Image (cartoon, coloured by chain):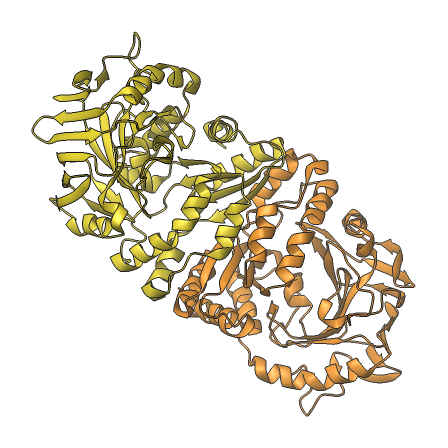
Chain colours: A yellow, B orange
Amino acid sequence: MDDRIRRHARVLVDHCTDVASEDDVEIRAPTAAEDLVVALYEALGRRGARPTTVWRNPRATRAYAREMDPDDYRPKEHRVAALAATDVVILIKGARNASETSDVDGEARQAASRAKEPLLRERLDTRWVITQHPTAADAQRAGLSTAAWRSLVYDAVDRDWAAVRERQEQVADRLAAADEVRVVIGDDADLRFDVAGMGTYNDAGRENMPGGEVATVPAVDGVEGEIRFDHPLRRGGREAEGVRLAFEAGRVVDYAAERGEDVVEDLIETDAGARRVGELGIGTNRGVDRVTGNVLFDEKAAGTVHVALGDALSECVPEDRDENESAVHADLIRGAGEDARIAFDGETVYRDGEFLIGGGDGSGSD
Amino acid sequence: MDDRIRRHARVLVDHCTDVASEDDVEIRAPTAAEDLVVALYEALGRRGARPTTVWRNPRATRAYAREMDPDDYRPKEHRVAALAATDVVILIKGARNASETSDVDGEARQAASRAKEPLLRERLDTRWVITQHPTAADAQRAGLSTAAWRSLVYDAVDRDWAAVRERQEQVADRLAAADEVRVVIGDDADLRFDVAGMGTYNDAGRENMPGGEVATVPAVDGVEGEIRFDHPLRRGGREAEGVRLAFEAGRVVDYAAERGEDVVEDLIETDAGARRVGELGIGTNRGVDRVTGNVLFDEKAAGTVHVALGDALSECVPEDRDENESAVHADLIRGAGEDARIAFDGETVYRDGEFLIGGGDGSGSD
């Protein structure tokens, strides 16, 4: 086994989820990630933890969704019960065919998403992490050789996460103190976010591996303006390109796409919360040296920002504030390496892919 | 997909477990059984049920067991919670390499078995079935081509189970009324089982698919005599041949094997219940036309009998009787096609592979 797989497993068990003896650990993984699952069992055995693997199987999901009456979707009670007794969840992505569920229709997709909401809430109550095992199909989707994709994945994962945390702290502190964030990118974006009193998220690789972003959540009605995204939105094996969103009082009031507009429509129509913003994030991970269409990596790429529609990052929403709830949390990525400016309360803190605050080499230089 | 896989899935969902809308269904399957899992999701979607798949992964099990301190094994609480909320369990066997866990030592194996006991109890409270998906590795182990193994599996599964039930009923009734069963096979076996007041099990394909046996459980201290098994005992990728057992007052008081005696020892030393008999069964399935070393099939083969060490078939034990409990239930198979006689209370009811009672074509002729 490639030794990078064992190192990846150790980062997940030691750094991300800090697994202890007797923790009940749920791994969710597709067949294609088998090597990482084996490495995780090795690491978990060493810690005396108790793992179970739930098999993520897009072929089965598709077969089921095509036969199931969308009105019959209900939360799986045995999954809710399992998660309520689970301490740690390790979610592994990695496709054999990333388009496997592309011919499942939007109604079934939305019904399935809604039925998963109680599971999502239970998972968020555990120590959880989402990660990626590099496969040939995902490399193909990124337009890379399998070897190049593997290198990108492990370069992004294998970092000094303690140093990342420290460098990002200054940006996170300034953001926490700000009332308004403005993002301007050429003629494509001019968005204002009301973040007064909201928290910040210094992502140094806990819930996402790779990590590497600084994020916040705007007030439920606190987003105004327009943006055009220059990277694709991918949902369940389908994709939209050139997505444009217009916001008023926090809600998407208009949307369009150059290609795949139905994908945007399916997303936005999932539920009321899918029309509102659950996150504004700024990527800092220089191991992610290109946008590949994989959101787990793209949103961390230094020189990008992202806006998520749907469920809010809970850690950024104080208890006395409204929190946007949704069955979805869909990140849209926008390059910010050129002609881009981010201001906190009118002061420019980020220009063309670089933070102007945050220490000598910049918060994003790891 | 081979249409026999879809028929197999329908037998499991319709006949064996009678899945209803909104049932929570747990499938446990290895990678090698993916096609059957997909067919099951199709059938379950049609019924409006809610499936989850737990990934059985011998490579991961091995990696874990080799790192885990045997003293640290504990029941997985999240698995117990999940099963308590589960209506139906479909357990699928099928190996890519049946020897994958052969280098896990006996102590770890026993500790893992013991930690699974609460899960076993929860599973027995659901509507459950164990079945087999035919793989190349299992064909190899049986000494068959993959195509021949597939045919054997589907011939054994694809039967008129209502007719099987009816034909076996007369044997089961006679057995229920008997006080003693005696099994004599040449010079190799002379066993007496005290079955007074115990129930019988008419297996027409519910908990096992394929089914096809009539079984009972002796009183906890009600087994006397000796037997030599002429088919291998296989446990966790290891095997023993020519196993001999001697019983006194229901307990194994002596054991030996021509090869792999340590496999017998590991089994018998698991716990106190592993020394006692949890089942005496007589196979009736003529679709299983040879003994291949796969116990799920071999114990159903017409012309064989089997004795299981360990946990008792609960359905055969009246509530006011002692029931043998164990973390294991290990079936040992003995050919009974030649020089074999089974008597209920002194009356011969079975000779050389054929029941002498049970209607025109014999109970075992399906």
Q: In this rendering, is residue A279 above or below B94?
A: above
Q: Is residue B187 left or right of residue B318?
A: right
* Residue at 62%, 31% in the rendered image: A46
The residue under the point 42% across, 56% down is A75
A211 and B247: which one is in front?
Answer: A211
Residue B15 vs residue A332, the one in the foreground: A332
Whether residue B95 is situated above or below residue A138 in the rendered picture = below
Residue at the location (21% across, 50% down)? A263
Is residue A256 something one can see in this rendering?
A: no
Q: Where residue A146 sits in the image (x, y, percent)?
A: 34, 35
Residue at point 50%, 31% (across, down)? A17
* Depth check, front residue: A157 or A354: A354
**What is the x, y in percent for residue B227?**
85, 65
* Residue B301 in view (yes/no): yes
Please tell me in which quadrant of the rendered image residue A194 appears: top left
Image quadrant holding the C terminus of chain A, namely top left
View extreme (top): residue: A360
